[in-house]
Image (cartoon, helix red, strand yellow):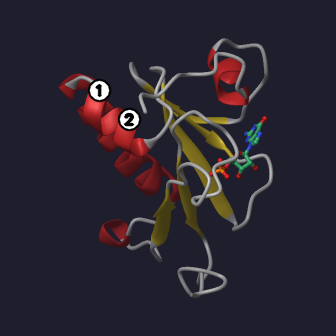
Amino acid sequence: MPYSYDDDNIFAKILRGEIPNDTVLETEHSLAFRDIRPQAPEHVLIIPKGKYVSFDHFAQEATAEEITDFTRAVGEVCRKLGVAPGAAGGGYRLISNAGRDGVQEVPHLHVHVLGGRVLGPMLAHPA
Ligand code: 5GP
């Protein structure tokens, strides 16, 4: 089933400037801001500015320029937060939830960057 994008989702409103955000980084095609309900000392969301619902949607339909911009934005946020191991940080976890089983709350692609403490097992309730 093809993706259809909901223009009323909360991140679309953030991108339109209708809702404030705590911006960490803005590039031509991406925006990174702090999660409103942080689950770690560092918890930042990175979103593309384009209308993509999930990572696979983005991978399939985004331009090479958007993909490069977004990927570099993720790396730059990790360095800015001081969590990149290559820059003496303690490390981080990237999460991108999609769809029902991924328990995606906001239907606009976002990558969570979590860090600042040891994050424990990958899933709270392994199968
Ligand atoms: P998901 O479950 O879709 O992967 O995560 C959505 C994330 O968006 C959640 O961690 C939630 O706290 C965050 N979030 C929801 N609404 C807002 C908002 O208005 N502002 C910010 N900064 N984060 C939000």
Of residues 25 and 124, the one drawn nearer to the viewer in this rendering: 124
At 57% from the left and 48% from the top, the residue drawn is: 99
Of residues 73 and 55, the one drawn nearer to the viewer in this rendering: 55
Q: Amino acid at mark 2?
A: His
Q: Badge 2: how crowded within 10 Å, few (<14), some, or many (20+)? A: some
At 63% from the left and 50% from the top, the residue drawn is: 104
Rendering quarter of residue 79: bottom left
Q: Amino acid at mark 1?
A: Glu
Looking at the image, residue 124 sits to the left or right of residue 1; the answer is right
Q: Secondary structure at mark 2?
A: helix
At 29% from the left and 38% from the top, the residue drawn is: 59
Q: Position of residue 28 (x, y in %)?
A: 39, 18
Looking at the image, residue 49 sits to the left or right of residue 38; the answer is left
Rendering quarter of residue 17: top right
Identify the mark at residue 61; answer none if there is no mark.
1
Q: Quadrant of the C terminus?
A: bottom right
Looking at the image, residue 123 sits to the left or right of residue 96; the answer is right
Q: CA distance from mark 1 to mark 2?
A: 6 Å
Q: Badge 1: how crowded within 10 Å, few (<14), some, or many (20+)? A: few
Identify the mark at residue 72; answer none if there is no mark.
none
Q: Quadrant of the N terminus?
A: top left
At 52% from the left and 22% from the top, the residue drawn is: 4
Ligand 1 quadrant assignment: top right
Is 39 rendered above or below residue 70?
Answer: below
Q: Pointer 1 and pointer 2: residues touching (CB < 8 Å)? A: yes
Of residues 44 and 12, the one drawn nearer to the viewer in this rendering: 12
Residue receiving disc 2: 57
Q: Position of residue 117 (x, y in %)?
A: 62, 79
Q: Position of residue 61 (x, y in %)?
A: 29, 26
Q: Secondary structure at mark 1?
A: helix
